[in-house]
Amino acid sequence: MIKKDEFQQCLLGHTVDFRKILSTPTGDWSVKGFIDIAKNIYTISVDTKVISKIIELMMFPILQKFAKENKFQMIFCAEQNHYPDVTFITKDKKKIALDLKSTYRKNFETVSGFTLGAFTGYFRYRDSNKNITFPYDQYEKHYILGIIYTQQEELIDENKVYSIDDLEDILSVVKDFDFIVQEKYKIAKDRPGSGNTKNIGSCVKICELKEGTGPFSTLGVKVFDDYWINYMTLEMARNAKLKNQPYSNLKQYLKYRNIENL
C-alpha cells in the first residue's frame, strides 16, 4: 500500500499533467466556453460552481492514469452530492477518499477557501451508507486535491456569442492554476465553510494549504474528528435546548475537553 506521504507525493507528481490539461501555454484556462451543433461558442459563467464542475471533469482522466500506475481500483461517486468524489482501493483492499475542490485567489497570499465536506450525516454516523460511497470508517485516509486559480480581471460579456474563428480571441474566465494535495484534517479550520450549509471550512492562507499546517495539523486527526463530530452551530444548539454552543472555536474546544494546546 502507498503510505500517506507517498500517496501525496505520487499524486502531486501529476501536477504537470493537471496543468497541461487545464492550461494553455500562457497559463489561461484551456476551456473557452460551451459549443453547440451550429458551432456557436457561449462564454462560461464566472459562477464558481460551474467552473469547479468543469475542472473536476477535466481532471478525471489524469486520476485514472494515476490509479492505473499504482494498480488502484478507482470508483467515482454515484451522485453529485455524495462523498467522496473518488474512492481508490489499493491492492491490499485499503480505501482512500479523494475529494476535488477548487477556489480562487483573493490576493498573493490568500484564497476564498474550500468547503471540506459535511460535519453532519455520514461524518457523524460513520457506519452509514447515506450520501457516501462506503461508510466513513472504512476509509484509511481522507485527502483533498485542491485546485487554486485566479479569476480574469477583464470584464467578460456573457451575452456575446462567438464562432470557431473567434476562439483565440475569447478570454478565459480563470487562469494561473496551482495544486495542493493534503489530508483533510491538515487544512481544516475550526469554523464552518461559507453559507448556511453544515460544511467544514478550510484554511485560506496559501502557505498553510500547501504545507498542511492548519490548526488541527499538530493535534491530529482524532482531535479533528472529535471536534467536528460534536460541533454545533448556534441553531443546532438551540434545537438541542442548549443556551449556547458547547464551543465555537478550537481554543474553547480544548478547554471544553480539558486538553492542553500542543
Image (spheres, helix red, strand yellow):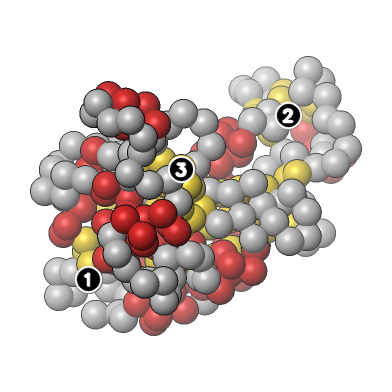
Q: Secondary structure at mark 2?
A: strand
Furthest toward the left, the residue is 127
Give the mark nearest the N terminus, 1 or 3.
1
Q: In the figure, residue 92 lies in which quadrant?
A: bottom left
Residue 83 percent coordinates (x, y): 31, 45
Mark 1 and mark 2: Cα distance apart in space? 40 Å
**Dot 3 amino acid type:** Pro
Mark 1 and mark 3: Cα distance apart in space? 32 Å
Would you say 159 lies left or right of 120 here? right
Q: Secondary structure at mark 1?
A: loop
- The disc label shown at residue 90, or none: 1
Say whether residue 49 is visible: yes
Residue 161 percent coordinates (x, y): 78, 21
Name the residue: 36% across, 35% down. Answer: 244
Name the residue: 23% across, 67% down. Answer: 140
Would you say 151 lies left or right of 166 here? left
- The disc label shown at residue 43, or none: 2
* Mark 2 nearby-residue class (10 Å; few <14, some 14–19, many ≥20): many
Which residue in the protein does label 3 denote? 192
**Dot 1 amino acid type:** Thr
Q: Is residue 66 above or below residue 146?
A: below
Give the mark nearest the N terminus, 2 or 3.
2
Give the mark nearest the N terminus, 1 or 2.
2
- Could you say which is closer to the camera, residue 261 or residue 117? 261
